[in-house]
């Protein structure tokens, strides 16, 4: 049985994901880069990554994570991206190419902090390392130059708990929690 990754995320609706993919593909072509993007159906901004599980995700982790998420009360918000960026140093085997942003992603950071606080309160381990919200577009063997781009994101009105079967480029939403309007 294949394993699964488990994480909390913000996900754009299908129309928004397609718009992001079209805009980013055009930006790539304009710069002479091949737009080999990940499928837009899996575009997301990770809020918290629990890790990889052999087989199904641990039921206790899912239960505690769900309880913690139900306690998060945050308003819905507009998230915006302003930079296309390539991460990693030259020694890395693959480089994530991501959308990121400054102030346009501050509400994402605030939501993530509130979620992590509740996860820890429920006895789950949560990373305290720096967090930079991003949407991974593709992976490449080489880095690419960063460039600025004003790209409207979407109104984040919910966050989700996702399991992703290893190697299938597929996300299965386990549960959803609304952000208040």
Image: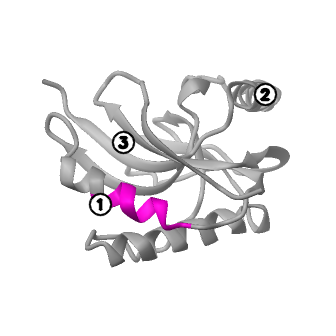
Q: Which residue is mark 3?
A: 93
Is 107 in front, or is 63?
63
Left or right, 90 with respect to 106, comes to left
Asked if one can make out residue 143 in the rendered structure from this viewpoint, the answer is: no
Of the two numbered discs 1 and 3 on the same chain, state the one appearing first in sequence. 1
1 or 3: mark nearer the eye: 1
Q: Main secondary structure of the magenta part?
A: helix
Whole-angstrom CA distance, mark 2 to mark 3, is: 29 Å
Asked if one can make out residue 135 in the rendered structure from this viewpoint, the answer is: yes
Magenta range is 64-72
Quarter of the image holding residue 167? top left
Q: Position of residue 149 (x, y in %)?
A: 83, 47
Of the two numbered discs 1 and 2 on the same chain, state the one appearing first in sequence. 2
Q: Which residue is mark 1?
A: 64
Is 21 in front, or is 108?
108
Of the two numbered discs 2 and 3 on the same chain, state the one appearing first in sequence. 2
Is 138 in front, or is 61?
61
2 or 3: mark nearer the eye: 2
Q: Position of residue 161 (x, y in %)?
A: 43, 46
Look at the picture and state if 85 lies above or below 44: below
Could you say which disc has been placed on residue 19 in the image? 2
């Amino acid at each position: 049985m294949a394993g699964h990754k488990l994480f909390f995320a913000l996900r754009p609706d299908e129309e928004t994901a397609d718009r992001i993919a079209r805009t980013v593909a055009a930006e790539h072509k304009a710069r002479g880069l091949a737009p080999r993007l990940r499928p837009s159906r899996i575009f997301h901004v990770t809020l918290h990554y629990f890790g990889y599980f052999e087989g199904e995700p641990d039921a206790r982790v899912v239960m505690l994570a769900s309880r913690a998420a139900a306690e998060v009360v945050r308003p819905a918000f507009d998230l915006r991206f302003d930079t296309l960026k390539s991460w990693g140093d030259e020694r890395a085997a693959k480089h994530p190419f991501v959308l990121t942003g400054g102030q346009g992603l501050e509400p994402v950071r605030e939501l993530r902090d509130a979620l992590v606080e509740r996860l820890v309160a429920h006895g789950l381990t949560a990373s305290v390392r720096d967090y930079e919200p991003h949407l991974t577009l593709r992976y490449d063997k080489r880095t690419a130059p960063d460039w600025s781009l004003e790209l409207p994101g979407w109104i984040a009105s919910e966050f989700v708990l996702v399991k992703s079967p290893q190697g299938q480029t597929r996300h299965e939403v386990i549960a959803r929690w609304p952000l208040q309007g």
